[in-house]
Image: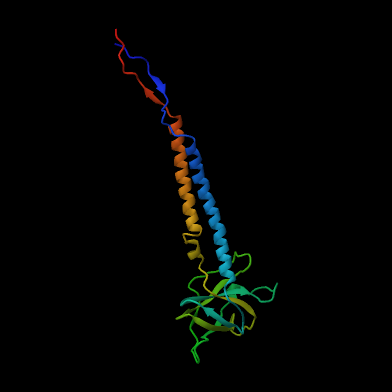
């Protein structure tokens, strides 16, 4: 009894080229989603900065706070175009914040920020948090003061909330786009590799039929 030599046959159930397209589509889709999230995030940040109420010190003015909580005061520079801004190291603000809706209300406590937030990379606005106060309830607040003791230098300030970390960590923002890009890249690459192996791999088949002697 002898066995015929082994011969190679192709698996007729191998995946079609469509799976290559699906793998590439996952990769491109993930990257495109990330790029779109960057564009969306930039638009959200620009809108949030544009909507911050702005005042000119020392006279200041009234701002509307829509939610209770910590409110930040950002120094943006001089109200006069082209005039050099005061170095942030020299800024030691003396601010007075009074609830405008309560007659005879006491000024609120104004504190230095717990961390230096800001938006220095914005193409339109450039600001750093120089102070903050706690609004116990929504309402109107009159903000006035100076950048430092006995320094009446006019200054533009923005009052409100600007949380870059919160925006970036949103699933509809850069974080969600990064997750989509990672999943698309990993799943798409695995799919391309498996498709290639299944299409170009070979299986050895030996005919077990015995030849009659």
Residue under the point 41% across and 31% down? 13
Residue 133 sits above or below residue 12 on the image? below
Residue at far right of view:
82
Is residue 119 at all visible to an observer of this figure? Answer: no
Residue at far top of view:
213
Q: Which of the image's four quarters has the N terminus?
A: top left
Picture quadrant of residue 128? bottom right
Picture colour scheme: rainbow
Marks counted in the figure total 0
Residue 33 sits above or below residue 158 on the image? above
Is residue 16 at all visible to an observer of this figure? Answer: yes
Residue 80 sits above or below residue 170 on the image? below
Residue 155: x percent and y percent? 63, 78
Residue 144: x percent and y percent? 58, 84
178 or 93, which is in the foreground? 178
182 or 92, which is in the foreground? 182
Q: Which of the image's four quarters has the C terminus?
A: top left
Residue under the point 44% across and 41% down? 190
Residue 160: x percent and y percent? 53, 75
Picture quadrant of residue 208? top left
Residue 29: x percent and y percent? 51, 48
């Amino acid at each position: 009894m002898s066995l015929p030599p082994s011969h190679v046959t192709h698996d007729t159930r191998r995946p079609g080229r469509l799976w290559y397209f699906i793998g590439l589509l996952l990769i491109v889709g993930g990257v495109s989603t990330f790029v779109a999230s960057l564009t969306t995030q930039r638009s959200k940040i620009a809108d949030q900065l544009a909507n911050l109420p702005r005042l000119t010190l020392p006279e200041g003015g009234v701002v509307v706070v829509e939610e209770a909580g910590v409110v930040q005061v950002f120094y943006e520079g001089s109200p006069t175009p082209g005039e050099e801004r005061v170095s942030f190291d020299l800024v030691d603000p003396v601010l007075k914040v009074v609830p405008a809706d309560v007659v005879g209300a006491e000024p609120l406590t104004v504190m230095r920020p717990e961390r230096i937030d800001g938006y220095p990379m914005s193409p339109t606005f450039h600001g750093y948090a120089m102070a903050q106060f706690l609004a116990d309830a929504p309402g109107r607040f009159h903000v006035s003061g100076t950048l430092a003791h006995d320094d009446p230098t006019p200054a533009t300030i923005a009052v409100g909330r600007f949380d870059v970390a919160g925006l970036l960590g949103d699933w509809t923002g850069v974080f969600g786009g990064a997750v989509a890009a990672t999943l698309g890249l990993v799943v798409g690459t695995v799919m391309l590799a498996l498709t290639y192996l299944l299409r170009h791999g070979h299986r050895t088949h030996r005919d077990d039929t015995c030849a009659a002697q």
